[in-house]
C-alpha cells in the first residue's frame, strides 16, 4: 500500500485454486469446500481518494469493455457495508485499473472487495479488527475472506470463511483465459444436478487428514493430490476447451495444470521461471489472455 495525504494505492491480487473439492450442500444453500487458494502477483490496482461532499462515492473501472452498474459493483457494496458498520462518512473516489478477467475464477471482484475493506479501514484509522473485517467479507462473497488474510496461500474450508495459511509452493504460474466467462452459481447448480443423478458425493469424513496431506503437498510442490471437481461437469464444448488448454500447458512443461474455481481460467504450475515465461508467450498466440506470474507476498 502507498499512501500520500488521503490518496492510497493498493494492489488487489488474483487468486488461483490449486485444488478444489466441493463437499455437501449446506442448509444455507452454499456448499462446503476443501480448497487450496494461492495469491499471485498478477492483479488489479486500486486508487482511493477522499472527495467532497461527505458520503459521496465515485467508482471508475478502467480497462473494462462494458461498465458494471453501480449497485451491482461489489466495490460499492463493500464501501456501503463499511460505512454502515463504522459510520465512516468521507466521500471516496475509487479508480480501478482492471486486469483480472470477469467471471474467470480468479477472484477479481472478491479481491477488489477485500482491498476496499482493507484500504477504507486504514484510511479511517483502523476502526475494525480483522475479525470484524472478516465478518463483512463473508457477507460480500465466499472468496472475499481469503483476501482479507493477505496470505500467499491457504487451506480454505466451510463456504470459504475458514482460512488456514500454509506455505506457498516454490513455483511459477501461467494463467490462460479462453475468452468466455463462467457463472459460478450456475456451475454449482450443474454439479448438484449431476450428483443427484448418480455421481458419488465426497465424504466429509477424515477432512483433517486430507487437508494436512494437501497442505504439505502444496508447500513441497507435489501435485498428485490436486484436482478440481468442476472440471468434469461442463458440457462437451467448454470441457474440450479446458482440457485442450490444460494438456497444452503440460506439453509446454507444466508439472501440473488445472482449472481455477468454477472456470473459466486454466493455469499451469512450472518449476522453471524461463520455461513458464515461454509457455505464457506461446499460449498468447492461441488465446487472447495468457500471463506469467508468481506467488504474491505482501
Ligand atoms: O459467495 P459467492 O457470491 O462467490 O457465490 C456465488 C454462488 O456460488 C452462490 O450464490 C452459490 O450459489 C454458489 N456457491 C456455493 N458454495 C460456495 C460458494 C459459492 O454454492 N461455497
Image (cartoon, rainbow, N blue to C red):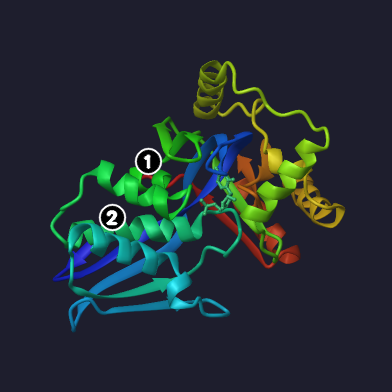
Q: Is residue 87 visible?
A: yes
Compared across the picture, whether 133 is left or right of 252 comes to left
Q: Is residue 280 visible?
A: no
Q: Quadrant of residue 151?
A: top left
- Judge whether 168 appears above or below 75 on screen: above
Compared across the picture, whether 235 is left or right of 265 comes to right
Query: Residue at label 1?
Result: 151
Residue shown at the point (61%, 53%) measured from the top left: 175
Query: How busy is the neighbourhood of tag 2: few (under 14 within 10 Å), some, or many (20 plus)?
Result: many
Q: For the N terminus, give its image quadrant.
A: bottom left
Asked whether 136 or 107 is in front, the reply is 136
Q: Quadrant of residue 230?
A: top right
- Image position, residue 267 (x, y; %): 64, 48
Q: Secondary structure at mark 2?
A: helix
Please name which of the two marks, 1 or 2, marks the residue nearer to the observer: 2
**Which comes sooner in the sequence, label 1 or label 2?**
2
Q: Which mark is residue 30?
A: none
Asked whether 35 or 254 is in front, the reply is 35
Residue shown at the point (64%, 64%) measured from the top left: 289
- Judge whether 116 appears above or below 190 on screen: below
Query: Residue at label 2?
Result: 118
- Image position, residue 261 (x, y; %): 61, 47
Residue shown at the point (83%, 32%) measured from the top left: 198
Q: Quadrant of residue 145?
A: top left
Query: How busy is the neighbourhood of tag 1: few (under 14 within 10 Å), some, or many (20 plus)?
Result: many
- Image position, residue 127 (x, y; %): 15, 53
Amino acid at each position: 500500500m502507498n499512501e500520500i495525504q488521503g490518496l492510497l494505492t493498493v494492489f488487489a491480487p488474483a487468486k488461483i485454486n490449486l485444488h478444489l473439492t466441493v463437499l455437501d450442500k449446506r442448509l444455507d444453500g452454499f456448499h462446503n469446500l476443501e480448497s487450496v487458494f494461492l495469491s499471485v502477483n498478477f492483479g488489479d490496482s486500486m486508487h482511493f481518494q477522499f472527495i467532497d461532499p461527505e458520503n459521496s462515492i465515485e467508482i471508475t473501472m478502467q480497462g473494462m469493455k462494458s461498465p458494471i452498474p453501480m449497485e451491482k459493483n461489489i466495490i460499492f457494496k463493500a464501501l456501503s457495508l463499511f460505512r454502515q458498520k463504522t459510520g465512516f462518512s468521507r466521500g471516496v473516489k475509487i479508480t480501478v485499473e482492471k486486469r483480472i478477467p470477469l467471471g474467470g475464477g480468479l477472484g477479481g471482484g472478491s479481491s477488489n472487495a477485500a482491498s476496499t475493506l482493507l484500504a477504507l479501514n486504514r484510511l479511517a484509522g483502523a476502526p475494525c479488527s480483522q475479525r470484524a473485517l472478516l465478518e463483512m467479507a463473508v457477507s460480500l462473497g465466499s472468496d472475499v475472506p481469503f483476501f482479507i488474510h493477505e496470505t500467499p496461500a491457504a487451506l480454505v474450508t466451510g463456504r470459504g470463511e475458514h482460512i488456514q495459511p500454509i506455505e506457498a509452493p516454490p513455483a511459477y504460474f501461467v494463467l490462460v483465459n479462453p475468452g468466455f466467462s463462467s457463472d459460478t452459481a450456475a456451475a454449482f447448480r450443474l454439479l448438484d444436478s449431476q450428483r443427484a443423478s448418480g455421481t458419488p458425493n465426497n465424504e466429509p469424513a477424515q477432512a483433517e487428514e486430507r487437508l494436512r496431506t494437501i497442505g504439505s503437498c502444496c508447500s513441497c510442490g507435489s501435485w498428485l493430490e490436486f484436482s478440481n471437481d468442476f472440471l468434469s461437469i461442463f458440457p462437451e464444448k467448454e470441457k474440450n476447451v479446458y482440457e485442450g488448454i490444460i494438456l497444452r500447458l503440460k506439453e509446454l512443461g507444466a508439472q501440473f495444470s488445472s482449472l481455477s474455481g468454477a472456470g473459466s481460467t486454466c493455469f499451469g504450475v512450472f518449476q522453471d521461471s524461463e520455461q513458464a515465461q515461454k509457455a505464457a508467450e506461446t499460449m498468447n498466440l492461441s488465446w487472447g489472455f495468457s500471463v506469467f506470474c508468481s506467488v504474491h507476498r505482501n
